[in-house]
DNA sequence: TTAACACATGTTCATCTGTTCATATGAATT
DNA sequence: AATTCATATGAACAGATGAACATGTGTTAA
């Protein structure tokens, strides 16, 4: 009735699992990685990022372009900013946002390749 | 002064927005793209994907490796499967899962590069 | 056939998330 | 200074989400 499997004649699963576990990145890193992707995981934010693909836009422009409220755009930009996906500069009353670095561009591009098939 | 709003000699904001809008991918595509990233946006799923990076593992192995319940692993694998990020083959009572294609590998790698800085 | 095993699936529940509404900040204009 | 414009911020609510538990399905072994 007991299912003890103490005896292992050859290399069993446990050893294999341990070797796999040893090459896994730390959970903390994987957590951060997931947090990053989570930011991409919203259609509103993806649309915002795409609108900034080759342009620098202010909040109001994005809101008009994507037909959403200023408040919502601002909230989402804050998330994108915290994730270091966008940066901004001030010009008078306006804040112009743009993509922060090339990673954003490449990550989205990779995703598109997977989607378009 | 140059304060004309009705007839501006240069490109107005509205025209600029329209030209940007014309090169935006369809919302449907961007929605799918966000759905894809949403799948990556969970540390459990990322850990699962990473465990499959260079190995083929069955559900029980993953559960043991990541110290989570079989049910939870199964649920997440289903999500990964629906997103075409993993595939599986049956061997007796066990289902061996592996990454579906290279995109998965590259997307995660891109993400890691962004995180590690 | 029956039991044991490896997974899948359904449901509930607590938590997280995005949007809206209202309001605040802060620069430019009058 | 007061007003307007551009944006940020906070609270609150609806919908989404992931984990846990129980149960169902299909395979293998006895």
Image (spheres, coloured by chain):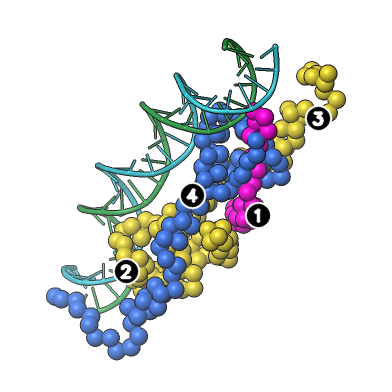
Chain colours: A blue, B yellow, C cyan, D green
Q: Position of residue B65 (x, y in %)?
A: 35, 69
Q: CA distance from mark 4 to mark 3?
A: 37 Å
Image quadrant of residue A110?
bottom right
Residue wearing tag 3: B11
Q: Quadrant of the N terminus of chain B?
A: top right
Callout 4 crowding tier (Cα within 10 Å): few <14, some 14–19, many ≥20? some
Which chain letter matches label 4? A
Does the rendering let one see residue A9? yes
In this picture, residue A94 sits left or right of residue D19: right
Which chain letter matches label 1? A
Q: CA distance from mark 3 to mark 2?
A: 61 Å
Q: Earlier in the sequence, mark 1 or mark 4?
A: 4
B76 lies above or below B9: below
Which element carries disc 4, helix, strand or loop?
A: helix
* Mark 2 on the same chain as mark 1: no
Q: Quadrant of the C terminus of chain B?
A: bottom right
Looking at the rendering, the stretch of residues picked out in magenta corresponds to: A91-117
Which element carries disc 2, helix, strand or loop?
A: helix
Q: Position of residue B77 (x, y in %)?
A: 41, 59
Q: Position of residue A58 (x, y in %)?
A: 65, 34
Q: Earlier in the sequence, mark 3 or mark 2?
A: 3
- Nearer mark to the viewer, of 1 and 4: 1
Which chain letter matches label 3? B
Residue in the image at 48% along x and 63% along y: B86
Residue wearing tag 4: A38
Residue wearing tag 1: A102
Callout 1 crowding tier (Cα within 10 Å): few <14, some 14–19, many ≥20? few
Residue in the image at 29% along x and 61% along y: B69
């Amino acid at each position: 009735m007991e299912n003890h499997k103490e005896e292992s004649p050859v290399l069993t699963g446990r050893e294999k699992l341990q070797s796999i576990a040893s090459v896994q990145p730390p959970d903390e890193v994987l957590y951060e990685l997931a947090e990053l992707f989570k930011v991409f995981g919203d259609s509103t934010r993806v649309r915002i990022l795409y609108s900034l693909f080759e342009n620098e836009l202010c909040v109001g422009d994005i809101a008009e372009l994507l037909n959403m409220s200023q408040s919502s755009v601002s909230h989402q930009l804050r998330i994108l900013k915290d994730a270091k996906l966008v940066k901004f500069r001030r010009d008078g009353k306006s804040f112009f946002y743009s993509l922060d670095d090339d990673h954003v561009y490449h990550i989205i591009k990779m995703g598109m390749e997977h989607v378009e098939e």
